[in-house]
Amino acid sequence: MSTDKNRATAAAILPLVGGPDNIRSIAHCMTRLRIALHDRSLIDDAALRALPAVLGVVEDLGAPPSGSGGNYQIVLGPGTVSRVTPEFEALVEQGRSPAQPPRAAAAVTAEELAAQGAALKQAQQARNSTPVKLFLRRIANIFVPLIPALIGCGIIAGLNGVLLNTGWLPVVVPALAAIASGFMSLIAVFVGYNTAKEFGGTPVLGGAVAAIIVFPGVAKIDAFGQHLSPGQGGVLGALAAAFLAVHVEKLCRRWVPESVDALVTPTLTVLVSGLVTIFGLMFLAGEVSAAIGSFATWLLATGGAFAGLILGGLFLPLVMLGLHQALIPIHTTLIEQTGHTALLPILAMAGAGQVGAALAVYCRLPRNRSLRTTIKSALPAGFLGVGEPLIYGVSLPLGRPFVTACAGGAAGGAFVGLCNQLGVAFGATAIGPSGWALFPLLDGPSGMGLNLAVYAGGLLVGYLVGFAATYFFGFTRQMLTDLNADQEPIPATAQPATEPAMA
């Protein structure tokens, strides 16, 4: 029955995005079905948002236009998206035909809030930053497919820690440790594989070069006057090594005769890239990784509440602009070094501020039934860390509540940062989840009970400050007059792309 439901969802979505022939490519991340389009005008936004399974839609303004197409993201939520995507891909493959009739352009709601105009202007500015945003998006494409494994292994590692500390089931502890650590010990290989795939090389060659980094035999090699260590450079070294391998391979494809290409190109790609990795990239990436870890530790140990205030307060704008993707390699590096990323619990406070702001909007607009309905449907996902429906359906189009939501995130981040400075240092063993969904992934030397208490306290502060700031400062008198009536839901057009969760 579950399969039938997922197929029905995919079948309902397909005609609303222009049919099979309007789809250039399909992918998904933690919460979103991502599709590249031939013709953006064939999308029926209003009908898509009305589907019960759809939590929201996001138009990717950071991607370069292709004709009149572009990239489009449909928020389905964690778990659902991974089940709907294969059904959607199958329906697209079955339905492709050269004579697919085009759909009419979707109608656009006439009434817009003044604050939404500012959001559209900001989105247009984001479109103009194409080179940087494209690069960050490609980096995100390397790491996002790894998130499910990071989550699974992180939760198993947490369970293993509980069993180890309590002395329960000692026979199972070594097995769980092996299961939880196996992926992390080889994560460089997966990063190398995805890097080559993303930048147009042969994925297995990227993985082969990255595998050098985790090979135990590198401990016998001297570089820069010191012995190399297996894993030195980590995911950053793997990314650099595979990126180099892609360029070496492309150069070989251009100059090596076709008759010997199958033998010469892979050999030269692995040999040249491997030597540069061993005698250069591993050392340099290792220094950068160590600097990242030291800086994060120093920032939270000395910056405390101020560091948390800045990180928690600025994360929603970073998400809105798509710049948060630059943090993904940093999170992964910290997890690789210490077993957890101390930054993620602080950044997750932005989602708490967003939830508090949405609750205040709900209370301040008692007669706006349509907006209250949107909030009620989006709040469960918001509590679990899926913030897109609240961002793009409520706070960002309204303008002021987006700013007050950031204030809530800043307050929650300041609380967690202060506790970190006082000695309660903890982090998340995986990236991706946020909100309440992050509880099973918390880890740190202070013990599970204290870690959970501090994180819960940060969420509570974020909720309360986000609510209070929005309730008292989130509306002008004119906004209350205009909005406090039964209206259609606020349109969320031309929304900038973000990465799910972690907010």
Image (cartoon, rainbow, N blue to C red):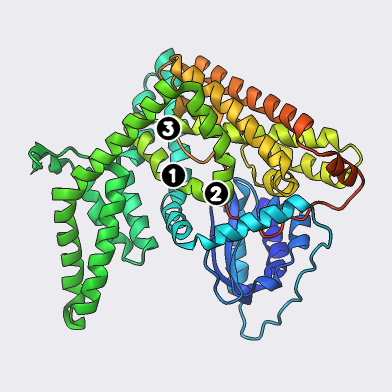
Looking at the image, residue 352 lies above or below residue 278: above
Residue 419, position as x, y percentages in the image: 50, 17
Residue drawn at (63%, 47%) of the image: 77
In terms of secondary structure, where does tag 3 sit? loop
Mark 2, residue position: 499
Characterize the local packing of mark 1: few (<14), some (14-19) or many (20 or more) Cα atoms within 10 angstroms: some
Looking at the image, residue 42 lies above or below residue 47: below
Label pair 1/2, CB-CB below 8 angstroms: yes
User: Given the image, on which type of amino acid does mark 1 rest?
Assistant: Ile
Which circle's residue, 1 or 2, is located before the other in the chain? 1
Q: Nearer the viewer, residue 500 or 64?
A: 64
Q: Nearer the viewer, residue 368 or 414?
A: 414
Q: Looking at the rendering, in which quadrant would you find the C terminus?
A: top right
Q: Is residue 47 left or right of residue 151?
A: right
In terms of secondary structure, where does tag 1 sit? helix
Which dot marks residue 328? Answer: 1
User: Given the image, on which type of amino acid does mark 3 rest?
Assistant: Thr
